């Protein structure tokens, strides 16, 4: 009896020992940390699937196309601004040239006005000089008339000196080659002692103001 009880107890103990759960390593179950890493790797693996790849590839392509359109729009705007700048620069240069021409003309007009300021007065006095010259050619034996002529000659000389200070001078004519800019030929004649096309006689004096002709001299020219 005792031996049978011992065998029965030993069998029961062996069964309990077999039913006892094995450890995690013996059961082939990875530790807790390794199981978390595995789950993360599985999640990463699911994220690397084909649908995710397609979405990631489509998004950069759209951004690249948007950047290309923006770059093209920026280039078009730059070209438009450059064209406007070139037009404004052309207008500025044209206005500057017009202003320079206006300033040069104004300066020349002021210089001419200063240089020939006595032109109008001198032109008005030329007939007066002609009358003095004709009066001084009169010959008389009367002492009183001679005194008057002397006084007229003094006035005539003073008038010539005043005009000379302003640049008015008589044009030389007799014995000079005929110059159409200085002389006005009203007659031609054959005169001994003169070369052809030479002023023989002065019929009316000519005058010039500096380098401007107030009146050409009326002359007789040899043929």
Image (cartoon, helix red, strand yellow):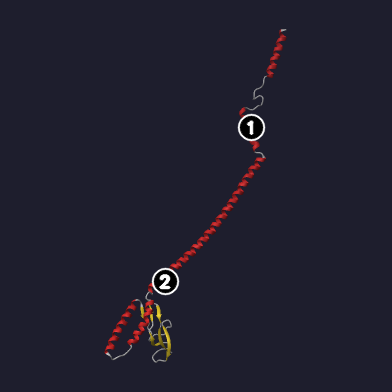
Of callouts 2 and 1, the N-terminal one: 1
For this view, does 162 lie left or right of residue 222? left
Q: Position of residue 59 (x, y in %)?
A: 62, 44
Residue 39, numbered circle = 1
Quadrant where the C terminus is found in the figure: bottom left
Image-quadrant location for residue 135: bottom left
Residue 109, numbered circle = 2
Of the pair 31 and 122, the residue shown nearer to us = 122
Q: Position of residue 200 (x, y in %)?
A: 39, 88
For this view, does 140 lie left or right of residue 12? left
Spatial distance from mark 2 to mark 1, Cα to Cα? Answer: 100 Å
Q: In this rendering, which labeled residue sits more in front, label 2 or label 1?
A: 2
For this view, does 55 lie left or right of residue 190? right
Q: Residue at x 32, y 80 (%)?
A: 159
- In the rendered image, the vertical position of residue 153 relative to residue 12, given as above or below: below
Q: Residue at x 70, y 14 (%)?
A: 12
Image-quadrant location for residue 217: bottom left
Can you see residue 185? yes
SS label for mark 2: helix
Residue at the farthest left position:
143
Q: Position of residue 129 (x, y in %)?
A: 35, 83
- In the rendered image, the vertical position of residue 92 relative to residue 37, given as above or below: below
Near mark 1 (Cα within 10 A), the count class, few <14, some 14-19 or many ≥20, is few
- In the rendered image, the vertical position of residue 100 relative to residue 155, given as above or below: above
Q: Residue at x 67, y 40 (%)?
A: 51
Of the pair 41 and 202, the residue shown nearer to us = 202
Quadrant where the N terminus is found in the figure: top right
SS label for mark 1: helix
Near mark 2 (Cα within 10 A), the count class, few <14, some 14-19 or many ≥20, is few
Can you see residue 210? no
Residue 54, numbered circle = none
């Amino acid at each position: 009896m005792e031996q049978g009880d011992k065998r029965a107890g030993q069998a029961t103990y062996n069964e309990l020992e077999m039913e006892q759960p094995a450890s995690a390593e013996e059961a082939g179950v990875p530790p807790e940390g390794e199981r978390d890493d595995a789950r993360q790797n599985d999640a990463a693996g699911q994220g690397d699937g084909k649908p995710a790849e397609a979405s990631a590839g489509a998004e950069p392509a759209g951004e690249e196309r948007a950047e290309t359109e923006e770059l093209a729009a920026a280039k078009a705007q730059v070209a438009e601004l450059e064209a406007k700048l070139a037009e404004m620069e052309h207008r500025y240069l044209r206005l500057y040239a017009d202003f320079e021409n206006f300033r040069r003309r104004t300066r020349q007009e002021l210089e001419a006005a200063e240089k020939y300021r006595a032109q109008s007065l001198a032109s008005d006095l030329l007939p007066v000089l002609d009358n003095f010259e004709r009066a001084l050619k009169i010959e008389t034996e009367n002492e009183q008339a001679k005194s008057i002529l002397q006084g007229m000659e003094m006035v005539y000389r003073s008038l010539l000196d005043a005009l000379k200070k302003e640049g008015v001078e008589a044009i030389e004519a007799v014995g000079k080659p005929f110059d159409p800019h200085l002389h006005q030929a009203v007659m031609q004649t054959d005169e001994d002692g003169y070369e052809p096309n030479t002023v023989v006689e002065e019929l009316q004096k000519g005058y010039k103001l500096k380098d401007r002709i107030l009146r050409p001299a009326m002359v007789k020219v040899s043929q």
